[in-house]
Image (tube, rainbow, N blue to C red):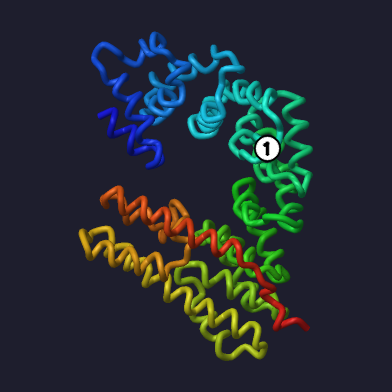
Amino acid sequence: MLVDLALSSIPYEDEGAVLTAVRMLTDESTPVATIRRLDFLREAVSVAYALRAIGTDEALDELEQLLLALDPLRISDDLAWIVARMVIKSGRTRLAEVVWRFAQREHRYFWRSTAAFYDAIGYLDNEEATDVLLVDAANPRSDGRCGAIRGLIHRQPTVAFEMAYAALSSTGDRTPYPDLLIDIDALRGAEVLLGHLPHERSSLIRPYICRALRRLQQEPKVTTRIGKMLMGDDAFVRAAGAQVAGWFDDFASEMVARLSIEDVDPMVRRFAQSAVWFQVHHRRVKQLLDDLATSRGTEAWALLEVLINSGAPLLLTRRGDPLWLGRALTDQPRAMIAYAERKTAAQLKKINERDEDALKQFSR
């Protein structure tokens, strides 16, 4: 039972390390409470993975006590990452101090690119830690900018929102910020994104904005705002409204179809035509996902290939979305899951490497 719990909760490539620790924990003579008698420093990463994956209060309590008592000089990079994830995912905020002690001894070039560290130390009521977050959150050249902004959410959400919006309008990798704005304040974030989209020229960032807004497709205030955009006087606003509508499931379909044919502006017609296709495609992908969930063997592999090659990677890789590929793989072999993760990650990487001026041919 513990093995099943552990393996269902960890990355595929970490199985070996966890199995070693789980075997210790499932030995009748080695219950969770006696884990202290093991050589924790030697097996720290394996034990930590196992205890975190098992996830019972007893296991997490024991791991928390072990980590709080640990000399920070003995904390490895991998162990520090596990601790940070515990702070974020398990609500073990006392462990933020362990992450901060590790971060203080490490060179900033190492840890500033690890978003989990920033997120974890954001729970600290510590002026020095807050200053680190503020400095990196305001630095467009920092690899840790997004993580630092996320860390500020816990104690300074208003500052975090303003910095996230500034980052969306800045340079560098802007892909995380549409979702981050929604995470901080959903309705305010939606308003900001809908105001930003009409004049966003990046062909990469526009879909990320639409995907973030898709999280609120059942929110009346958001759908009403998009409906007004579709009827706006400004062609850029109508085009943006049509693009967002295409990312929603069966939203304003008749209005978007009419714009695709009748709008006087060729830019609006082009964006509306793409939106019509996208909505139809969403329905087809959803049906394929339903078919894959109940298929087995060669039929399942064939359906998986069709989905990977035709579905939108931004949605197939979006955990929790109705079009998330993972929901159809729950009962499939682990080899199929690993293959799907590898292929969709490669496709997402390819998308993120391509960026063009989405409005170039329509410039006034």
Which residue does the image show at 57% across and 25% down from the upper left? Answer: 93
Compare residues 2 and 241 and report the one nearer the observer: 2
| Residue at image location 56% in from the left, 64% down from the top | 351
Query: Looking at the image, is 181 positioned above or below residue 60?
Result: below
Q: Secondary structure at mark 1?
A: loop
Q: x, y (%) of residue 336?
A: 31, 54
Other-residue count near label 1 (Cα within 10 Å), few / some / many at <14 / 14–19 / ≥20: many
Q: Amino acid at mark 1?
A: Arg
Q: Quadrant of residue 6?
A: top left
Quadrant of the frame with the N terminus: top left
Examine the image and state in which quarter residue 155 appears.
top right
Q: Is residue 208 visible?
A: yes
15 or 307, which lies in front? Answer: 15
* Residue 219 visible somewhere in the drawing: no
Q: Position of residue 196 (x, y in %)?
A: 71, 64
Image quadrant where one finds the C terminus: bottom right
The x, y position of residue 224, in whole percent, is 59, 67
Q: Residue at x 57, y 17 (%)?
A: 74
In depth, the one of 126 and 240 nearer the eye is: 126
In the image, residue 189 sits, relative to residue 14, either above or below, namely: below
List x then y, in percent, for residue 146: 67, 45
Q: Residue at x 64, y 77 (%)?
A: 239
In the rendered view, tell whether residue 318 sits above or below residue 281: above
Q: Is residue 53 left or right of residue 130?
A: left
Residue topped by disc 1? 112
Q: Is residue 211 left or right of residue 284?
A: right
